[in-house]
Image (tube, coloured by chain):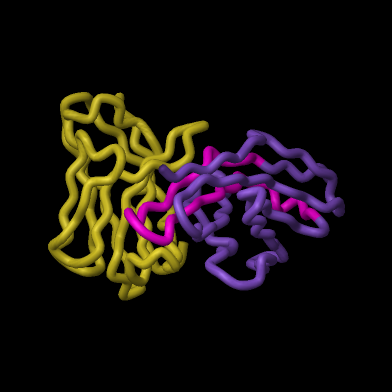
Amino acid sequence: AQSVAQPEDQVNVAEGNPLTVKCTYSVSGNPYLFWYVQYPNRGLQFLLKYITGDNLVKGSYGFEAEFNKSQTSFHLKKPSALVSDSALYFCAVRALTGANNLFFGTGTRLTVIP
Amino acid sequence: DGGITQSPKYLFRKEGQNVTLSCEQNLNHDAMYWYRQDPGQGLRLIYYSQIVNDFQKGDIAEGYSVSREKKESFPLTVTSAQKNPTAFYLCASSPGDRGTDTQYFGPGTRLTVL
């Protein structure tokens, strides 16, 4: 069975500080991993994905994520947070084989404090 | 949100009524999806379609129905059999149904049962 865990419902960080939003996953075989961001009353916007290759993936708006197979993690990071980064962030996983569903975590609300 | 439109943005339904949510995409994507979002639960898959005139049930299909008569359109009907339909509904599409394909989301429809 596939699953995603986002252990923190809420993350607060000061503007200009580095931010990390955590994600761990469980999947049979190799995973495909995705990060999305959602602003209030809007749809999800794609940030980045890991398919294969370099464990550090760079995405939109200065975000990056590091795939760690041994820890089954895919944490989202940004070196310097902006107030405009405040939003709801979702991690999602898809298995290499089997159903092509995306399994989403429950989301982490990021608040960047001016 | 670009390329995927959902209407209406807000929808109010009386108990016992069926309502249909519209989803249109101009991205020439083969695959389309419907998700339901509830607070604290992430996104759950209702139905998906890999190609015109074909669709499959997701994790929570009971009380919902879909059709895929055209490549660009994937309407969702919330029937009176859905016991708790108040939620935020998100439509998505992807180029195909491969695991590497990114899903892109529409802006969503918020359905409230009165």
Foreground: A60 or A31? Answer: A31
- Residue A108 falls within the magenta-colored stretch: yes
Look at the image and tell me whether residue A41 can be seen.
no
x%, y% of residue B77? 20, 44
x%, y% of residue B28? 31, 75
Residue B43: name its quadrant: top left
Q: Is residue A111 above or below residue A53?
A: above
Foreground: A59 or A56? Answer: A56
Look at the image and tell me whether residue B60 can be seen.
yes
Image side of residue B4 versus residue B78, left or right: right
Please tell me which residue is depicted at 77% across the width and 45% down the height of the picture.
A112
x%, y% of residue A19? 78, 50
Image side of residue B50 versus residue A85, left or right: left
**Quadrant that contains the C terminus of chain A:** top right
**Quadrant that contains the N terminus of chain A:** top left
Please tell me which residue is depicted at 48% across the width and 39% down the height of the picture.
B42
Q: Is residue B50 above or below residue A70?
A: below
Q: Chain coloured purple: which letter?
A: A
x%, y% of residue A103? 44, 47
Residue found at the far bottom of this picture: B28
Figure label count: 0
Q: Chain coloured yellow: which letter?
A: B
Foreground: A82 or A92? Answer: A92
- Residue B67 falls within the magenta-colored stretch: no
Please tell me which residue is depicted at 70% across the width and 52% down the height of the picture.
A85
Question: Where does the magenta region start and end?
Answer: A81-109
Image side of residue A106 versus residue A22, left or right: left
Please tell me which residue is depicted at 20% across the width and 34% down the height of the picture.
B63
